[in-house]
Image (spheres, rainbow, N blue to C red):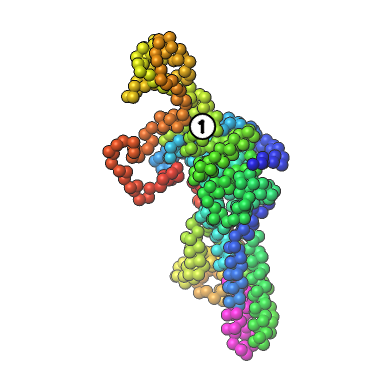
Amino acid sequence: MINLLKSEVLKIRSTQVWVWMLLLVVALTTLFTLGTVLSIQTGTPKEGINYFSVWTTFGTAGIALLVLGLLGLTTEFRHQTITPTLLATPDRWRLLSGKALAYVIFAIPYGLICIVVNLVVATICLKAKSFPVTFADGAIGGIVTNFISLILLAFFGLGLGALIRNQAAGMVAGILYLSIINGLLSVIPVIRKVYLFEPGGALTAFTTRDRDNYGLRHDVIHVSPMVGGLILLVWCVAILIAGGYFSLQRDIS
Amino acid sequence: MTAPPPPSSPEPPRQSLAKSPASSHPHGLRHTGAVEQPDGRIVVDKLTKVFGTQRAVDELSFTVEPGSITGFLGPNGAGKTTTLRMLLGLIAPTAGTATINGVAYHSLHRPLQTVGAALEASSFHPAHTGLQHLRIYCAAANLPAKRADEVLEIVGLTNAAKKKTKGYSMGMRQRLGLAGTLLGDPKVLILDEPANGLDPEGIRWLRGFFRHLASEGRTILVSSHQLAEIQEVADRAVILNQGRLVRAGTLAELSAGTSTAIVRGPDLAPLQQALAAAGLAGTTEPDGSLRVRADELTQIGHLAFSNGVELHELSLEEFDLEKLFFSLTEGAHQAHNFDQPGAPPPQVPPAGYAPGEGGRR
């Protein structure tokens, strides 16, 4: 497994995609942190500031991690490098496990960079606007769960890529889901009741403050953040297994 | 060309495989329960693959003997690539087995150190350099990174090592693919159309490359359309047509009784009678020459001399793999025959037509 990990990390490092993704997560984190802090009205008392939101804005970079994970397998199919990859690692489940582990490991520094950028930008902005710099509102816990969510999204993207195989279709599906479909699912009657059990809903539960049913309607069945995290993890594993079963098991011709 | 270094350690037989004879591979390839024998033998047994309603490979059986170079021949769509991909665990067979060293490819203990395979000249990430491409698989196979530099030198790509593969010519891609096969210094090499896209210089290089590999006692299974090249380097051939085996054996076996003596002279009738009496059938060609099925010329020369027949030519048209190939695969193509004068021009292929081995999939 160590050899497989080395090989996968080498694959990621050998193209400039990781650099562009790094720039993207830094840009997204900076932009959304600026937006969050600068939107706080001057003179707002400390108690009126949503510090949880200020320190966890980096979670929005998850979409970039999802795309990074998605590229993990779709690139192999797009450039037909899946053939030499499977010749080197013929056990397809082992290959999938190795890739999942590699992307989890690769997502960690991305997550840490996001946290650092969020901290630096938010601190500068808060001080510039003369707001106290404090980690109130359960911000520390929020930073941890959002950091874990970034890793899980890379994992989810890998599974989605295994399931869809086509790179363009996979990226469109992943981005559309996170940006539009997920939001729609939270408002459609009947469906919204189980919103927190679908991946995007579980992500919301895991990464948002557990107050007022996460800002959702009251007929949405409530789950705690930890349960939300577990549901998201189950989805990640399920999507990866489904991808492995339906897609990777196909003939490579 | 420098010889690849020996493997870092001799490959131990995979004893653990014997523990799970009834287990099954998730890709549909059955564990044989056999122990890996590092002899380099390839055994294909009743291998069958059905795509929809088409039997791409139909109960194909053959053996590639250790240390031999075997040409795997057949027209486009004969099932060569499908067979090789089944052999390498990339396509699940509908029925039958294919083993290397007595086990299925996915059961090999160290696959890249056992089998080197080059299936297509386009399996490279365009943004990777040749060196990066090879180093990725060095890492996967636990080989030192410097092995990538060594194999690039063997195939003459050292100068292009740091060039991105998107800038490689077809010939360079073929060489990079061949370099990949040598990474683990395997005893078995499986090559699918390695001469495709090579210019005459590249083909000459490939011929030398094969000879070099053969001199090292490797088992090589090579599919190719370059029949003359195969005849020159291979000692065995497996000929496939429409998914079925039509002929297999050593070139000596395949060539037995296939040579033809060509006899020219002003009056060959007495010789033809003498040949018939000696049991040698001869046919008269429109140009008056006589063609006699024979592996050598001594008897014909003697009969001509003893019957006082004047000869202007007595030559032997020796075994030609290409002729044998075409005689065995006749009718595989319904293509326009340009040899027939006055024949209508060829039709434009219909939309979606995909030439080549993989086109029908």
- The chain holding disc 1 is B
Task: Give the image location of residue B53, x and y in percent.
Answer: 39, 41
Q: Is residue A45 magenta?
A: yes
Quadrant of the image containing the N terminus of chain B? top right
User: Is B89 situated above or below A228?
Assistant: above
Q: In percent of the image, x 39 and y 13: which residue is there?
A: B309
Q: In percent of the image, x 51 and y 38: which residue is there?
A: B223
Q: Type of residue at label 1? A: Gln
Instruction: Kindly state the secondary structure of the residue where label 1 is placed.
Output: helix
Q: Would residue A126 be seen by someone viewing this image from the given angle? A: yes
Q: Identify the magenta region.
A: A34-60
Q: Is residue B232 magenta?
A: no
Magenta stretch: helix, strand or loop mostly = helix
Q: Residues within 10 Å of mark 1 (few under 14, many from 20)?
A: some
Decide which of A239, A28 is in the foreground and name it.
Answer: A28
User: Is B284 situated above or below A122?
Assistant: above
Dividing the picture into quadrants, the one containing residue B190 is top right
Task: Give the image location of residue B247, x and y in percent.
Answer: 47, 28
Decide which of A155, A2 is in the foreground and name it.
Answer: A2
Dividing the picture into quadrants, the one containing residue B89 is top right
Task: Give the image location of residue B104, x and y in percent.
Answer: 58, 38
Residue placed farthest to the bottom in the image? A43
Residue position for label 1: B231
User: Is B312 situated above or below A84?
Assistant: above
Decide which of A152, A72 is in the foreground and name it.
Answer: A72
Q: In percent of the image, x 64 and y 46: which residue is there?
A: B153
Quadrant of the image containing the C terminus of chain B? top left
Dividing the picture into quadrants, the one containing residue A156 is bottom right
